[in-house]
Image (cartoon, coloured by chain):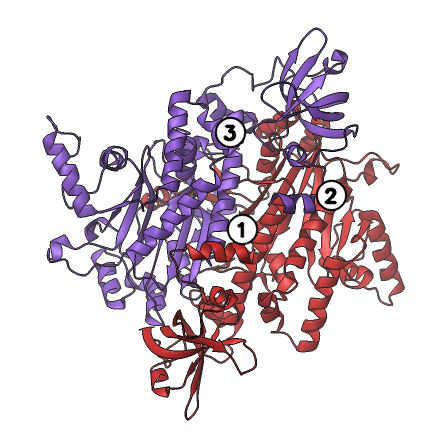
Chain colours: A red, B purple
Amino acid sequence: MLARRFLSSASSPLAPTIRQLLLSPPPPPAACVAVNGWVKSIRRQKKVAFAVISDGSSDAGLQAVFTDINLAKNLTNGASVRLQGTLADSPGAGQEKELKVSEVEVLGECDPERYPMQKQALTVEYLRDHCHLRARTREIGAMLRLRDSTTRAIHGYFEDNGFIHVHTPIITSNDCEGAGETFRIAPSSSDASTSDAKPSEYFNHPAYLTVSSQLHLEAVASAISRVYTLSPCFRAERSQTSRHLAEFWMLEAEWAFTSSLTELCDVVEHAIRHVLRTHAASPDMDALWKQHPPATSEAKRAELQSYADAPQPWTRLTYTDAVDVLAAHHAQTPGGAFVFPPAWGSSLQSEHERWLADTYVRGPVFVTDYPAVLKPFYMRLNDSDGGGKERQTVACFDLLVPGMGELVGGSLREERTGLLEAALERHGLDKADYAWYLDLRRYGGAPHGGFGLGFERLISWMSGIESVRECIAMPRWAGRMLL
Amino acid sequence: MLARRFLSSASSPLAPTIRQLLLSPPPPPAACVAVNGWVKSIRRQKKVAFAVISDGSSDAGLQAVFTDINLAKNLTNGASVRLQGTLADSPGAGQEKELKVSEVEVLGECDPERYPMQKQALTVEYLRDHCHLRARTREIGAMLRLRDSTTRAIHGYFEDNGFIHVHTPIITSNDCEGAGETFRIAPSSSDASTSDAKPSEYFNHPAYLTVSSQLHLEAVASAISRVYTLSPCFRAERSQTSRHLAEFWMLEAEWAFTSSLTELCDVVEHAIRHVLRTHAASPDMDALWKQHPPATSEAKRAELQSYADAPQPWTRLTYTDAVDVLAAHHAQTPGGAFVFPPAWGSSLQSEHERWLADTYVRGPVFVTDYPAVLKPFYMRLNDSDGGGKERQTVACFDLLVPGMGELVGGSLREERTGLLEAALERHGLDKADYAWYLDLRRYGGAPHGGFGLGFERLISWMSGIESVRECIAMPRWAGRMLL
């Protein structure tokens, strides 16, 4: 990995970043290096000054030492600078190398009186109001690098397992079963010209922003048997929770030739373990967990790694068994353990999901085989378990993780045309709208399944960042969209 | 690369794909392997039958041999099957290995009478009408794998060069300078309820689909100095050309601490050379070029590789020089060479761009330093070249490539607050709307630049696919959006 990086850096048109510089074989002792970056902090003593310079390539930045303190006199927090000097071993704690500065050029000044990103702690709300500048904070910078490295780990996992990445459509005619939480689109000229016109249909029929790439992936997976996408999805929901965004990214995978819910769960578990393992020594995760009290943060990081390294598969539990343990716990607790009494046939509430992962399992848990009535039309009906029609279940799962609740959902998809048509009818959907979806089964259909994972939730879970609004560069939610 | 694949496949929950199987070390001679896929073709002889089975993991598929022809009797084109047998060296031309089949299971039948994807050549228009099934054709399958491998090559290049991938917003308040070719969005419930209401503003102000991630990337690049995105972009244009889509993907990169147009062009050139080199032996590119007559296709592929391997940098030419050579050629040609006479101060037309790349340079060419009046407000004004205000140019480039025309556009961005404010005014834009954009300069601004590359155009150029509508899984253009 590193070898490759150095090789191609050699022919790169770009000068090394601070991260590349610190990872490179050391330059000859007297060799002059140039470093570009922003001043993160500055400390002036009588005969020497120190500054931390960051170009965003790593959490650490580079310590710059000014033995001629005049060189540092124009430096302020936030200013962009170009420094020249020599790299030397650092006697100080906290860094291996430092830059002994011989030349300074201020490229862009930053008035410390007016700079909106002051050194003192800024509130989450203040930073949301300044989202064009908030990548300059340590937390958001680390989160952005964590998104990048997590994305690369995901791409690596799916490539290694024979999956093809597909760019699925964002604009779609599918309105998510008419649930009404979609965004509808129109060319801006049409509603600008007249105030009372319906949006003219640029595509000749209504167009929405996608809420999931699943159905599109299923179409491609009927030809390229393993596909996935990391794609933006949109929900116009009004709920203001720490786990919901109007625009979010979802990892969705779909593959043919599987009839096994166990295999689906295995792939999800392997993929997440892979991501966690590649981040076992992530300085960006360190930086983010350091926002919490040390006792909590160390325990939490160790806990995450223990999920990655657990010798046994993560716990799997049917919905029916989950309701049993929830109901027993509820009954045993004086006054009841939950606001919503657990009952077969009702959705699991957040409080139920959290208790299962946080307390009962104390780790990730796949809850499988939910009642058909609770789930979308496309999930594959299980063979009767003797409970009769009222107890019909589908071959699906939700992955619940401690501190978060639902992180992934998936299922086998109904590939039997007759059963799928019956399910469409049961859900009050128009068969004509799904003719293409039925075609996928009619012509060489194969048993298949897949899942969706909320990318911002994964970042939140891995980093301890409380709200998904801080898990994306420029968050959008009800009432809120800057830039 | 392969070593890594085998290593992790060993612990993969999934059985190997056909591609993985053929790349793996051969199994012991008598070992039984199972293969899942779709029947691509079937050839029955008296005592033996042959079928090509594809699971979409590679262009080639796998030849299956049935010495018991009864086993093949239920196979039809398009059916999904599970075959078991032993892998053996193939005596036939065209493949190294074949599967001697001992067991057949038809997973999903495909009625040859009704199957919309018949073996005979289907028109491009027919396939567009069946876009849920068209990934089953050899061309679209190869194109989807080419998108995947090109995406990975791009991610590899930018990772190696210290860039962080950022998911930039899709929904934005930026309406692209009011050009009117944006899509506007509203929650679907608002315009469904009343036909004469303006779309209620879910975000409290108008929201559009992004036409470019550049401004957002600039914000992040003022903290993380090298960023890029491969992101969907949207234009509600009515033009019906082979190079335009309403929804397309754009590679955009932005980096700080550059004042050099040469460096911008160098990065673009290196990135594209890298992509071409990683595809020098791509079977998917082979399959796609094979759609053309052999003479053309071999010459074209060789030509593409020659651009990747050219010892000299690609030609760079200022706009002013380009207009001079265009005008000279126009004047020298009896009756004129072009429909639009070339003139300084006018945009280069497609015919001009094509002639420059196809005929004059016979290769990729960067045309740089266009007149300021032709370009957006954010491009960096060049120092006066003595031509006075009328001849003011900006530090920008378009990369023109043979057979295509414009593939990439980029520029240095105006980082000088005063000049940027003047440019906003000149373009009739409201300074208040760009207060955040000015902030990026006000507080530690750094010289910076970037570019945007149309991903479908790149795929079209690399593969010889004529229209970008065949360069994406499910294309959207004016009047057209299926699924």
Whether residue B194 is visible here, answered yes or no, is no
For this orientation, the residue located farthest to the bottom is: A46
Look at 72% across and 8% down and name the residue there: B47
User: In the image, what residue type sits under mark 2?
Assistant: Pro
Badge 1: how crowded within 10 Å, few (<14), some, or many (20+)? Answer: many
User: Could you tell whether A406 is left or right of B262 in the image?
Assistant: right
Mark toward the viewer: 2 or 1: 2
Which residue position is annotated with label 2? B13
Mark toward the viewer: 3 or 2: 2
Residue B468 percent coordinates (x, y): 41, 33
Residue A192 percent coordinates (x, y): 34, 46
Q: Mark 1 and 3 residues: CB-CB less than 8 Å, in contact?
A: no
Mark toward the viewer: 1 or 3: 3
Quadrant for residue B430, please give it. Answer: bottom left
Q: Say the numbered circle drawn on residue A236.
A: 1
User: In the image, what residue type sits under mark 1?
Assistant: Ala
Q: Say the numbered circle drawn on residue B140.
A: 3
User: In the image, what residue type sits under mark 3?
Assistant: Ile
- Above or below, B368 against B103 in this view is below
Please tell me which residue lies in front, A441 or A338.
A441
Give the Cα separation between the discs numbered 3 and 2: 28 Å
Quadrant for residue B359, please give it. Answer: top left
* Dots 2 and 1 on the same chain: no
Residue B60 percent coordinates (x, y): 58, 27
Give the Cα separation between the discs numbered 1 and 3: 33 Å
Badge 3: how crowded within 10 Å, few (<14), some, or many (20+)? Answer: many
